[in-house]
Amino acid sequence: MEEKKYLNKIFTYKLIYIPIFIIITLLFFLPLLVVFYKSLSVSNIFSVLKDKYINSVFKFTIFQAFISALLSTIIGIYGAYLSRFINKKNERLLISILALPFLLPSILVVLGFINIWGNNGIFNIILKKIFNVDYPILNVLYSFKAIIMAHIFYNIPLSILIIRSYWNKIGNNMEASSYLLGINKFKTFFTITLRRLLPAILSSFLLIFLYCFHSFAIVLMLGGDPKLTTLEVEIYRRSRDINLFSSAASLSIYSLLFCLIIALIYFYFQKEKFKEKNNYFLEQKKLKGFQKVLGITFTVILLLFLYLPIISIIIRSFFVDNKFSFLNYSKLFSNSDFIESVFNSVNIALLSSIFTTIAAFALAHSLRFSNKSKNIFKQLFIILPLATSSIIIGFGYYLISIYLRNFSNIIICSIAHMIISVPIAASIVKQNYDKLSINTQKSALLLGANKTRLLLTVDLPYLKHALFASFIITFAISIGELNSTLVITSSDFTTLPVLLYYSITTHDIGLSSTIGSLLMLICIIITSIIYSGVKNE
């Protein structure tokens, strides 16, 4: 305990992390306090609780999130199992293949599904020609199955990566011992492996549940039926009507409290993941026979499911009236709204990435030497934004912007995007910071370095890759962020995702695909940078 206090005293640079920690706290809680103030009336709170429509919306929100998380996790378990048979050289490629769909903005997922599964989508065009009919044979969009399919598309990569990462750490000698005792693989998996993987499986399920609970663009664009409305969509709709601000605020509070409980459970299982001590590995045998055929079939279907919507966006952008053309691109680049939206998107993404990376370092630095009680508080602070949807954060800042009429939309959106991105960025930096040996820092001090020099010559150089990864991933999140931007800004301020959203609502699929292709190009570049970073590591 005394050593911990000593390390805290000599290593922490309080002039850096304390002011930043206070600023982040204020920026996070200020919009929530404004929302809470709007819902302060007891009559408003109870009237929302008694509303049968709201109760049905809340039930549907939980139901669709549960089904989406359950199916994504089940598929993720098998995907993680197959990934264990991939050699280390191809392991890096696997991470990049799975990273791209997960890094896509949700509005791009919507566009990809419209291109593939829509009434005039690729599948229906092919089926119309095969069966010689003029009506769509597949009716997938604007239904519950469309929402679930889109959520599975978005979250399977996340589930595979979470479970695979944990599975690779726990070793397989217990399973090998089970085989030696004559127990078959099926029984061994359900009695030993599955139980050992439970913390990772539950972490995956709860995280995906939170993401699907907060899902906005997918439900708004692919639902189509008022019965398929979630809390986030309902909050957005009510936030656009000044007479419904109080009910939108009340719904935001309910959503926040419910998700906070889920986030705390998730935090508990995250800690449980690190308690598994057995990490002894035996040689992994290759898949053979039926297992190999099943594995290849699963991989092919998964790749088609993940990448056909992505490829379809690029293909559609080059066709006008079923003819190959660059007309969509020439129209887009001569459009002043597009130029303005690119300018706004890049500026917001740059500002939010810089703010977030600085904040992530400050939080990781303070967590490194905090005592246990303070550490838990700060870790909870990092995951608290997981319980807060971008719609609620956007609504809070929209209410603030009403009072700050002349305040820049770019600054407000940058702050909102920073709050959304901080948990991921701080986690990346903290994981790498924990690998830095305290003995290295002690040696620097013994050689005469003060805390400032220690920071500049040891800590920051060691963390440069993590800070760069934090910046790049935050940039990707910000450049594709639709939810908070749509709530905060009016129709005369556009970013690339907002422009794409408006374009899809006008059913101009060619122009939408062109905007989507440019957004996707940014995501591909970022994924390439991540792959390059993984390769260098």
Image (cartoon, grey):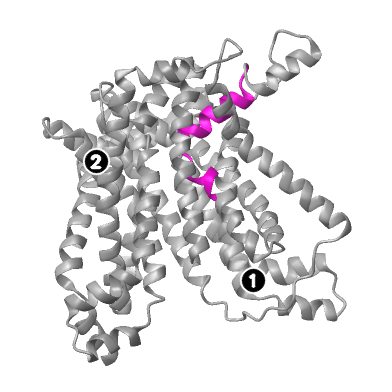
Q: Is residue 450 left or right of residue 461?
A: left
Nearest to the observer: residue 25 or residue 464: 464
Name the dominant secondary structure of the magenta segment. Answer: helix
Location of residue 448 in the rendering, given as x and y in whole percent from the top left corner: 18, 88
Q: Quadrant of residue 413?
A: top left
Question: Badge 2 local density, few (<14 within 10 Å), some, or many (20+)?
Answer: many
Mark 2 = which residue? 35
Q: Which residues are magenta?
A: 99-119
Residue 503: numbered disc: none
Nearest to the observer: residue 483 or residue 297: 297
In space, the residues marked 2 and 1 are separated at their CA atoms by 42 Å
Identify the residue shown where x is 57% and y is 34%.
310
Identify the residue shown where x is 47% and y is 29%.
516
Is residue 143 highlighted in magenta? no
Location of residue 155 in the rendering, given as x and y in whole percent from the top left corner: 56, 46
In this picture, is 401 found above or below 527?
above
Nearest to the observer: residue 428 or residue 382: 428
